[in-house]
Image (cartoon, rainbow, N blue to C red):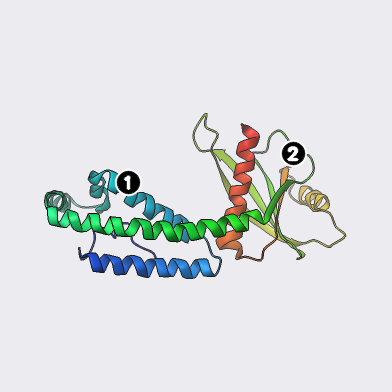
């Protein structure tokens, strides 16, 4: 997917119609991704641009951060002068403000479309522990299964606290293998097979997520599954 550059607001031609063209072309690409139910990385990219413009609208000094960070001393001095020129140029600042005022509702509208798709898919994904959930569940296995199919994606997960003494967690997923689950076979038996094969975790926390909709795996199902697991682990630790 063609992305919008981080510094799109201040780089290139400072013209309202040009910036409008860039933004609408980008949003058209995002909508195409959403039309194929591919949420990521498009949705997180949208949120970034929306929050970035919102912050700049509240604090114009943040425009300075839109300029390149790795530059020479001469370039730094030049860009400093350029920045000062921009913030002192009422006409140029008005163009930037007009762009922001146009872009924010456009970004929010498409972002809402992505969030609605996210919620719909999430409502059709069910998380449950496989067997008894141990007290220590910082790492273990995640079984991801599309309802009505035999293939089960087996992931090793690790969760870490984002900050000391904070409840917010991040979860890393590493695909181990894909196994075939017969209709007569239980998820508990799949867990037993994993314990026998991967002896480093003799009593692993194991979770199952069943996806009831056929959606793109990497762009939609896996990111939502990660967040569902993260939400569960966070609530467990609270």
- Tell me the residue at 49%/68% (across/down): 33
- Tell me the residue at 20%/58% (across/down): 95
Is 206 situated left or right of 102 in this image? right
Task: Pick whichever, 112 or 73, lies toward us.
Answer: 112
Of labels 2 and 1, earlier in sequence is: 1
Image spot of residue 163 (x, y percent) = 49, 34
- Tell me the residue at 60%/44% (across/down): 230
| Total tally of numbered discs in the picture | 2
Q: Is residue 95 above or below residue 191?
A: below
Kindly report which numbered mark, 2 or 1, lies closer to the viewer in this rendering.
1
In the picture, which quadrant includes the C terminus?
top right
- Tell me the residue at 57%/60% (across/down): 220
Task: Give residue 175's mark.
Answer: none
Image spot of residue 52 (x, y percent) = 34, 50
Is 171 situated left or right of 89 in this image? right
* Residue assigned mark 2: 133
Instruction: Please identify the residue farthest to the top as the structure is shown.
Output: 165
């Amino acid at each position: 997917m063609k992305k919008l550059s981080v510094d799109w607001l201040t780089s290139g031609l400072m013209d309202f119609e040009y910036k409008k063209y860039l933004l609408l072309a980008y949003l058209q690409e995002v909508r195409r991704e959403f039309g194929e139910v591919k949420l990521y990385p498009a949705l997180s990219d949208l949120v970034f641009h929306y929050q970035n413009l919102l912050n700049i609208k509240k604090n114009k000094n943040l425009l300075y951060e839109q300029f390149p960070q790795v530059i020479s001393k001469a370039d730094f001095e030049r860009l400093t002068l350029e920045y000062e020129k921009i913030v002192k140029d009422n006409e140029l600042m008005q163009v930037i403000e007009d762009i922001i005022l146009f872009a924010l509702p456009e970004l929010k509208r498409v972002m809402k479309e992505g969030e609605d798709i996210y919620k719909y898919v999430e409502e059709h994904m069910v998380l449950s522990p496989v067997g008894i959930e141990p007290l220590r569940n910082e790492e273990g296995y995640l079984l991801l299964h599309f309802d009505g199919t035999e293939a089960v994606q087996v992931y090793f997960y690790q969760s870490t606290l984002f900050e000391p003494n904070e409840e917010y967690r991040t979860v890393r997923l590493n695909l181990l293998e894909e196994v075939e689950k017969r209709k007569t076979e239980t998820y508990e038996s799949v867990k037993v097979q994993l314990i026998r094969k991967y002896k480093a975790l003799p009593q692993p926390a194991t979770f199952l997520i069943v996806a009831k909709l056929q959606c793109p795996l990497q762009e939609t199902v896996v990111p939502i599954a990660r967040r569902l697991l993260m939400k569960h682990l966070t609530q467990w630790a609270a």
